[in-house]
Image (cartoon, grey):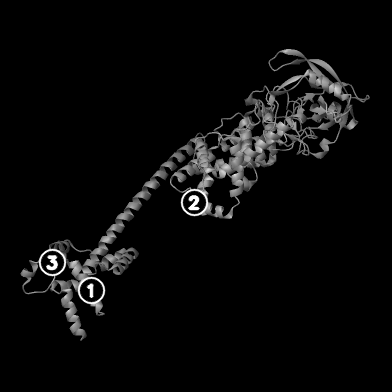
Amino acid sequence: MGTYDAISFVPPRGVRAACARGVVLHEEGYGGDGLQPETVAWARRMARGEAVSPEKATKMNAWFARHAVSPGEAEARRRDKKSPAWVAWLLWGGDAGRRWARRLVRQMANADKRARSRETALQYGPSIAFSVLPTDAEGGPWTVIAYEAELKGYKLQGGGHARITAADIDEMVANFARYPKAPLVVEHADTREGLPAEWAEPRGHVVALRRGTMERTLPDGSTRTVATLEARLDVSPAVRLTINGDAENSIPPTWPSCSITTALGTDPETGESLGTVLWSVSLTAHPRLADIPRLAASQDPGAPGTPGEIMERTEGTPLREHGHYWGEIKTRGDVVAMLRAIFELPVMASEQEVVAGLASVEGLIGIDEDTSGVDVDDLIGAIRRALKLDALKTATEVIAAAREALRVMPATEGEPPAAAESAITTASKPDAEMSRGHSAANPPKEGKPMSKFIEMAAALKLPAVATEEAAEAAIQSLARDGATVREVLGLKPEVAVAAELATITAERTELGKLRVEVKDLRAEAEKRAEAELSRRVEEVLVAEGAVGDEKRARALAAYARADRAAFDRDYPAPSVQELAQRAQDPQRTETVTAAASTDAAAKAADPAARTSVKELTQKLVAVAAEFGEALTTLEALEMVQRGMTPDSLRVELTKRAG
């Protein structure tokens, strides 16, 4: 198994889309001259969904680190979505590519660290109830603290799965003679971050170890004799009470089980490998959390998880956890434990706090990691893999699936899902498994439902709350809103709200379509009205002899738009007779002679002497302007009808000026 085999180098959808858009812009010529052919080639491959190499991922992260901080490039990308800076940004994967490359580099660094520090790996053993409880006797009786087992619930980085073998047990017993004491801590707090510091303080010590045997029923139903690791514990009366409890005084045990942490030891003087060493024994309130065959392990390297994880350390760095697999989830408690580990919550965080964390993650969906400071993609991916959901499930669908799992999963293994809610009550016997929604040190009162309203609120997708009272109030508010909806809709008791809302939704969809159609019709009507207005203004200009006067045309159009009724009153549309007359008047539409002459027929026989009415009118206006005279189009048109030419008008105006 390779170092990076657990890392997916297939580009996400956002990266593929950015690269595809970048390739299109590059082909259209917007890429500039600085692009390397290799960059474009990789962009084409990523757009097709091909996996990148670790080297390419490293280059991507370095490229974004350089170019993201350049003020000039950032301004160009913001201002012009066809600039070379923006095209290059897309070809490297865009904003999504920047986040993805950063995540890949972080995952590769963690994988490298794990590969370098295999010789110092720590490993948790399965949780097991104390077979014989400690007593006042010196060192107490012998009790089983671990057993030979295949730990198939999580994978090792180098391949295969973890295990505790008979040889490991023999080595721990032998090495205990070299170091004849191992601390007793709480919830592996000596090797995990995010837990109360006092939990890492020794609550006692293992003072003797030996190998034993026991009959064990395997997951497939068969039985076999397995090697056991037995210990004698030296603890104070107060710690003994947290392990034993006091049935006579109705005090349940706080830490009724234990789980060992092992390490690969090395002789500090000779450097010789010592094999497996007992690092510590952890008291735990979760006897099934890491039991065979399903061990709960954190998805995120370095995140506080649960027993069953691989612990690794490089020199000069604190111990970190690197689990990466969740086994089969059978109960609601397993779901809570999984979310607790992924969200890096303390091991004793309540179910309410886990549900609130789920709501917080949902609220961050769609917000950039640089803005929120939370890698939501990683969290969603961890939940998706833990629940074994389809890879195409969206972030919102993954959150919904987690809520559904909390709602329908049974409280205890083997219980039918339908009976889950009724079973969410306090166990009356000390050895019964507790709900993970409460601290074992503060169990709920017997017979009182645990987190009933909180779970109902989560199932109804209400905002997360921290208390039962707040959840109950939110559900009551929702019920009141439902009653109001029924009243407003006038629904009879036998009519389902959902069916009515479905009808309303369908009608609203049709209404939306009608609104679009009405909008299109209004646009067409406005277009026709504007065309009709232009025609009317043109008619007025013709009647006034002001054809071509743009200033007059704009004034008439503005008047018509402001008060169409007044415009039509002041400038009535021409009658049918007037339109017919205009059509028959050749002097309005045909050419006339260019010069005034009594011999008009002779002049008209010369084509060069003929010009259009419009041209003559414009020339007359221009000649008048040469002499400072203002001549209207209508006056010029009358002159044309009288046979006036530009030359004859110039002669007349010259005489008048002299």
Residue 32, x across and y down, in percent: 48, 49
Residue 535, x across and y down, in percent: 25, 60
Q: Quadrant of residue 582?
A: bottom left
Number of residues whose C-alpha sits closer than 10 Å to that of mark 3, classed few (under 14), some (14–19) or many (20 or more) = few
Q: Amino acid at mark 3?
A: Ala
Residue 380, x across and y down, in percent: 61, 36
Residue at (52, 54) in percent of width and height:
76
Q: Which residue is disc 3 drawn over?
A: 608
Q: Amino acid at mark 1?
A: Val
Q: Who is closer to the viewer here, 511 or 196? A: 196
Q: Secondary structure at mark 2?
A: loop
In the drawing, does residue 377 fall left or right of residue 546? Answer: right
Q: Of tags 3 and 1, which is closer to the observer?
A: 3
The answer to whether residue 559 is above or below residue 526 is below
The tag on residue 83 is 2
In the drawing, does residue 81 fall left or right of residue 166? Answer: left
Q: Which residue is disc 1 drawn over?
A: 621
Q: Name the quarter where the C terminus is drawn.
A: bottom left
Q: Amino acid at mark 2?
A: Ser
Counting every numbered tag in the picture gives 3
